[in-house]
Image (cartoon, rainbow, N blue to C red):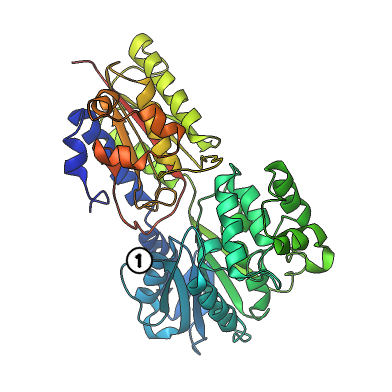
Amino acid sequence: MFYIKNIQQLVSHGNPEVRKTLLEIIDAAIAKADPYPATRELVQIQCDQLMVGDLKFNLTPPPRIYILGAGKATFPIARALEDLLGDRITDGLVICKYGQQGSLDRSKLCLASHPIPDESGLKYAKKVLALARQTRPGDIVFSCITGGSSALMPLPVSGVNIEEKKRVNRLLLTCGANIVEINAVRKHLSQIKGGFLAQQIHPRARLINLTVSDVIGDALDYITCPTVPDTSTFDDARATMAKYDLWEKVPASVRNHLKNGGPHQETPKAGDLAGHTIHNFVILSADAACEGAVEKAKHMGLETMVLSTMLEGESKELGGTFAAIAREIVSNHRPLAPPCVIIGGGETTVKIDGAAGSGGPNQEFAVAVALGIDHIGNVGAAGVDSDGTDGPTDLAGGIVDTYTLTQAAESGIDLFDCLKHHDVSPALKAIGGAIETGATGTNVNDLKIMVILPKT
């Protein structure tokens, strides 16, 4: 199976050998992060017992089984559970991003907007909460909440409407904050995030969280935050607002709620959920795509280095760093000698002040690399969002090589200016550097990868 839809087009531009190597590694990396086989490996039925890792649940008499979820990697988990459990499932509802392909038989597949929430997500969030409130003692509730659930399952606190929630999301996504800082704010503006959904499930039901991490360090309350105790506080949310100068930019309702929020409005903590039975399984860690890339690169005979699986910060700055490493390898054969690959993972950001065009953090990373590797050898690099949508675009990311800067100039495109104005998508499309996958069904950390082959 090939996740990248336009491989032939991408290989036909620039350095075909370098690009083909990069794209094969990227495809293997995405495949490694597929939640479907990971779920089927963890969840099994043996002799009228439901096995979830080391847990065992009797299926006689049959318990009521529910599936609840939201996120960009949620559908394959729900489908794997349906394929295994079939008509043993009582009911379920999962919310996925518009464009999600496939169907479910025993659960409802609902579609909503990401990364900016919409009214459909609000409607379905209320239905998820209502379904949680139907649970009874002895029920088994599978929660498959993955990255993207904050936008796909919005349920603002009283006094904040969905339009105001949209505005806050846009500000948070463009201010340069990391996901932990962003979610500290979002959880304290929600009636369903931050453990509130878990609180509505009957305490004597068995809640089983199956999740895919897109957060560095795999912190549960930032991966599957509606169904686990929250560790963040109103003070954390207020710190994010102050750090990124957001107080005067958000609607008054949001400002008032966050400034005045006290203990009685705080998200559920460990003590609040102490009477609930919650089992947590991270079926794919945040660095799963990096692991897949390493395996494929070694199989291809490349010297391999994982620079870090915890990359953060401004995407274009990281691109400059990768370009400097490429120049060091080409000139001095250190820290590796060609043929080799440098791999990184994490969640980099783009800070936007004022108007911007079309692009995303992985595309900006790729363009920044291109600016620093012009005609230095057999070098190529790519940045890819594992879910298939980089930022608010329909592209998964970007791929460049040492000919990219020249190709852009010949087409009348100033890549430096495109990067400056956060408008890199049109440029990458015009010069054959835009990676297209569509929805991949997974959502682990982004992949940054660079290949250096011997000079020819």
Q: Could you tell me which quadrant the N terminus lies in?
A: bottom left
Residue drawn at x 40%, y 56% as measured from the top left: 442
Q: Quadrant of residue 398?
A: top left
User: From the viewer's perspective, is 364 left or right of 240?
Assistant: left
Q: Is residue 182 visible?
A: yes
- State the image coordinates of residue 447 (x, y, percent, origin top left): 41, 40
Q: Quadrant of residue 310?
A: top right
Residue drawn at x 44%, y 38% as measured from the top left: 422
Q: Which of the pair 426/177 is nearer the observer?
A: 426
- State the image coordinates of residue 454 (x, y, percent, origin top left): 24, 17
- Amino acid type assigned to the residue bearing label 1 in the image: Gln
Q: Quadrant of residue 255?
A: bottom right
> Disc 1 marks which residue?
100
Does 403 sit above or below residue 70? above
Q: Residues within 10 Å of mark 1 (few under 14, many from 20)?
A: some
Q: Residue furthest bottom?
A: 61
- State the image coordinates of residue 317 (x, y, percent, origin top left): 50, 28
User: From the viewer's perspective, is 391 left or right of 388?
Assistant: right
User: From the viewer's perspective, is 238 left or right of 23?
Assistant: right
